[in-house]
Amino acid sequence: MEFIEGKLNEEKVFEGLVFPKTLNPSICNGTTELLVKMIEEKREWLSEILKLHNAILFRGFNVSSPEEFRQVVEAFDWEEMPYMGPTNRVMVTNRIYNANEAPLHQFINFHHEMFLTKQYPSKILFLCTQPSPEGGETCILPSHIVVSKMEKEIPEFVSELEKKGFMFKIKTANVNSNAILGTTWKSYLNTEDEVEAKKRSMEKLGCNSVEFNEDGSAEFVYGPLNPIREFEGKRVWFIPIVRHSANKKDTRTSFGDGTPLPSKGLETYKNILDKVCVDIKWEKGDVMLLDNLSVQHGRRPAKPPRSVFVSLCK
Ligand SMILES: [Fe+2]
């Protein structure tokens, strides 16, 4: 059976290619079984589509549980990437985690998954089993388009960033919670020992220094680094330069020499994100596949209930 090309009201077109590409079954009542079979038959074709469009939404296959989602993920035959990050995330079944449990009223800013670690997944998949009654869209954007627009609109800022580098600090929580950065350094790095934590933070996170605070929190300092990275010929805006926490104090940014980033550069960056993002209005049973090396994702504020699951591949 062939996939039928679908259309979303919210989709956009970049460089002549629709974003995301929507694929439907050719029958009314698609099933997980059918999707698994079609993925297995068309793996190579789907990889090509993903390379071109960077994001694929599978709609109409009625995937209804984390267990069915695992079967879909495994059909792609990609290796699993275990989650490591400053956000509490629970594995619900093999390979499948609940998505970020941050309070639903909060906006989760755009990011590439696990950009804070040295190794990050090349693909991320989502399943929605319960769309929010209001809001709760997973918002996505093509990160290479952000680079080209930034270079066009504010080239002097981009070259200054690339020359001086970019620095940022992330403060972890002092008590584990469901906040966006709700994991303590002990849970994050899986050790109680500060010396070992320091070692692991350099090895696994690739940050430049870490400070432990008396209140039990820790501050990880990254940079100077270039927020733009190149993957397979695409230059993408890999490190977000605007805060990605609901708490403004959690993240501080500057140029590599410590001088502040000009507000014009940050405003331009934010405006470009607003212009190029697509807010995916989930339907029950949707599965979305993103190239994590070229697409940033985030979450719009939502009203409960909302159930989205996630899986990461190397
Ligand atoms: Fe994420």
Image (cartoon, rainbow, N blue to C red):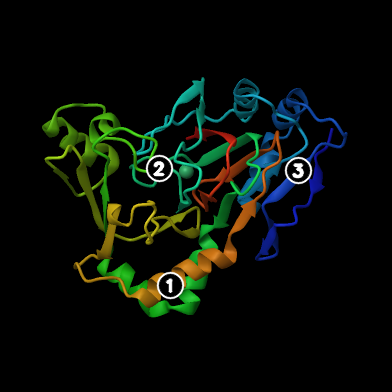
Percent across and percent down for residue 85 are 36, 38
In the rendered image, the quadrant that contains the N terminus is: top right
Percent across and percent down for residue 174 are 23, 37
Q: Amino acid at mark 1?
A: Glu
Q: Which residue is mark 2?
A: 114
Identified at 37% across, 79% down, the residue is 156
Q: Which residue is mark 1?
A: 267
SS type, badge 3:
strand
SS type, badge 1:
helix
Viewer can see residue 148? no
Q: Nearer the viewer, residue 188 or 116?
A: 188
SS type, badge 2:
loop
Q: CA distance from mark 2 to mark 1?
A: 24 Å
Percent across and percent down for residue 118 are 33, 42
Q: Which residue is mark 3?
A: 23
Identified at 31% across, 32% down, the residue is 176
